[in-house]
Amino acid sequence: DWSSDVCSSDLSGDVGMASELNGKVVVVTGAASGLGLGTARALASRGARLALIDVNAEAVALAAESIGGDAFGVAADISDADVIGKAIGRVADRFGAIDVVMACAGITGAGMVLQVDPALWERTIEINVLGTWRTVRAALPYLVASKGYVLIISSGFAAAPGPYTSAYAASKAAVESFGRSLRIEVAHHGVDVGVA
C-alpha cells in the first residue's frame, strides 16, 4: 500500500533503501509549493520520476528545476478539464506511463457563510472537488494500464469542520467520499486508491 509509504514521516530517509517508488512515474498536483512540493521532494529522494503540475507556470518550472533529475514541471489549471487532460497526456507522452497520481492541489476559501464572497466559496469547490475529479478522471486510463495508485488529499476538516471553513470542509469531505467510492470502482482493474 503506497499510501503508508508515501505519507510516512520518514520519506526523506535513507536514499539507498529499496523503495516501491523507485523508477515509478508520479504526478503531483499543487506541486509548486506547500504540501505538494514537500511531497514531491520526498518522493524524489525515494527514486520516483516526477511530473509536477501547478497553475503557476513560473513556480512549477522552478520547483522541477530545484528537484532536478528528470523532474518535469507542467503548468495547468486543474479546474479546466481540457487543460488538465492535456497536461496528463503530456506527462504520459514524456515518461511512457503514469504509475501514481497524488491529488494535492487545493485552496482554503475561508469565510463565514453569511459574509463570504459566493464566487470564492464556489471556486473552492471548483478547484478542490471538481479539480480533483478532473485530474483523476484524466489519469485513470493510464493508471489502469499500469495498475497504479491514486492518493487523494483530504483534511481533518472533512470530519471536524469549524467556523470560516464551510467551503474547505465540504470540499474535503467530498473528495474523501470520492476516493472511497473510486477505490471500490477500480479495484478490479488493479488500481489502488488512498485518501490521506
Image (cartoon, grey):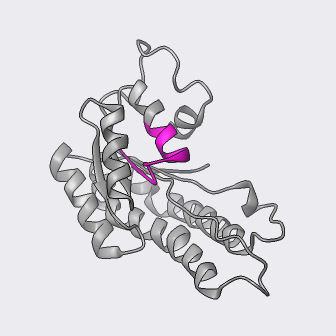
Q: Residue at x 35, y 60 (%)?
A: 140
Q: Quadrant of residue 112?
A: bottom right
Please give left or right for residue 27 compared with residue 115 in the image.
left
State the residue at coordinates (41%, 62%).
136
Residue reaching furthest to the front: 58
Q: Nearer the viewer, residue 104 or 121?
A: 121
Residue drawn at the location 46% of the way across and 54% of the way down: 30
Q: How many marks?
A: 0
Visible in this render: residue 25?
Answer: no
Q: Determine the image quadrant of residue 119.
A: bottom right
The percent coordinates of residue 88 (x first, y second) are 28, 59
**Residue 117 horizontal/vertical position (percent):** 66, 85
Q: Is residue 108 above or below residue 28?
A: below
Above or below, 115 against 55 in this view is below
Measured as percent of width and height from the top left, residue 176 is found at 62, 62
- Left or right, 165 with respect to 64, comes to right
* Identity of the residue drawn at 63% across and 80% down: 121
Can residue 41 be seen here?
Answer: yes
The magenta stretch is 25-40
Q: Using residue 142 as the reference point, say whether residue 181 is left or right of it.
A: right
Q: Nearer the viewer, residue 127 or 26?
A: 127
Magenta-span inclusion, residue 26: yes
Q: Is 84 placed above or below 150 here? A: below
**Quadrant of the image occupied by residue 68:** top left
Q: 46 or 69, which lies in front?
A: 69
Residue 116 belongs to magenta span: no
- Residue 12 at x, y = what percent? 51, 23
In the drawing, does residue 15 fall left or right of residue 104?
left
